[in-house]
Image: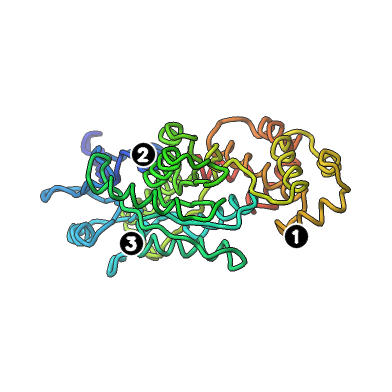
Amino acid sequence: MSKKQLALPEKKMPRVAVLVDTSTEWGRDLIRGVTSYAQNHGPWQLQVEPRGRENVLQLPSQWNGDGVIARVSNPNIAADLRSRDVPVVNISGIELEGCSFPRVAIDYEATARLASEHFYVRGFQRFAYVGPLHYSYVNKHADAFQDQIGTDVAPLERFQYIHESMGSQKWQKQRLRIESWLHKLEKPIAVFAWGTSASCQLLDACWCMNIQVPDDVAVLAGAEDALIAQTTTPPMSAVLNPSKQMGYRAAERLANLMNGGDDSGEDERVAPIEVVTRRSTDVLAIKDQELSAAVRYIRENVFSELTVAEVARSVPMSVRSLQVKFRELFGRSPLAEIHRLRIARVKELLASTDLPIASIAQATGFGTAAYMATMFKRETKVTPLQYRLATRLR
């Protein structure tokens, strides 16, 4: 028998459609995560169509492929994908009745917890939420934020936001509603917004109304878009979501299904990475002047060899008084706050840079990689390297 006769047939390259918008950083990063998996474990033939978030992403009627990763955002898309008889993994947080595709989505409760903590340590006692509340999943996001801020503060103010084109009459009418709402709010107040567009319009309205941001109104976007965030006045703080990780994990689950494996079909929720702090929330709304000065000193010097005694001397006040005031307002010690800020910066550097672990330890005030690793694992339950691998997916 000849060598040609012995040769095995070449394995077919899987053809995978990725139905995700390419106009947002969230969508592009998710596609990068899928691409990373395909390059490392494929190859796959990926089909990605450049489209905006509001465009309908749907497969051609005669499409012939092996699997789909999609933002299943409405019943029509769900019905079409069910009719294809191919494995599908859903990456949308939208909950549709009867839609049972395996899903990888953002952990909205963890996002709300991160946002509330971001505002809480800045001393805010009044909070608001802005988003398309006519969607049940957005209402759940707002409810989660309400749960996190608790009942010891003023009730959560909510504003129904609908994404409209800037040139439309509806946009102009909504703008007037936003301005009226902002005018009536008791200030200072911290606003958590569902997405980038709502945050942009809020900040622009504040600027036109001469409302001081972040002193009177602090604005945090629920999704990071580094390009858009730098265009707002002031630059916009935002939650850095794990889009690449979600894309990679969705691709893993799809690969298993395409290879004939089983999938529990359960939702997989991925926690956000951190808040990227810019000027739109970079403020202290703490009434106690001594405590405010201490918190400001910590934030300005946290990445140096900072001690609690040094913080107390900067005010000045006794270490004991500082610890008592900290626990009364924040429920933790000054040292715990120093560690929290350092760990947050470590997360950001691990997720977004290739800096060596030792360099990150030096840059964040931990000094040694060993000490940083100990504190990091105590807080996150994983090592810095494990966290980097999970968030960078290289």
* Residue drawn where x is 41% and y is 54% of the image: 181
* Amino acid at pointer 3: Tyr
Q: Seen in the image, is 368 located left or right of residue 276?
A: right
Look at the numbered disc 3 and give the secondary structure of its residue.
loop
The residue to which callout 2 is attached is 28
Closer to the N terminus: mark 1 or mark 2? 2
How many neighbours does mark 2 have within 10 angstroms: few (below 14), some (14-19), or many (20 or more)? some
In the drawing, what numbered circle is on residue 328?
1
> Which residue type carries mark 2?
Arg
Residue 333 percent coordinates (x, y): 77, 53
Sequence order check: which comes first, mark 3 or mark 2?
2
- Asked if residue 8 can be seen in this view, the reply is no
Q: Position of residue 193 (x, y in %)?
A: 44, 51
Q: Residue at x 22, y 46 (%)?
A: 169
- Where is residue 314 drawn, in percent x and y? 82, 38
Q: CA distance from mark 1 to mark 2?
A: 43 Å
Mark 1 or mark 3: whose residue is earlier in sequence: 3
* Residue type, mark 1 in image: Glu
The crowding category of the residue bearing disc 3, from other C-alpha atoms within 10 Å (few below 14, some 14 to 19, many at least 20), is few
* Residue that numbered label 3 is attached to: 135
Give the camera-side residue of 149 and 392. 149
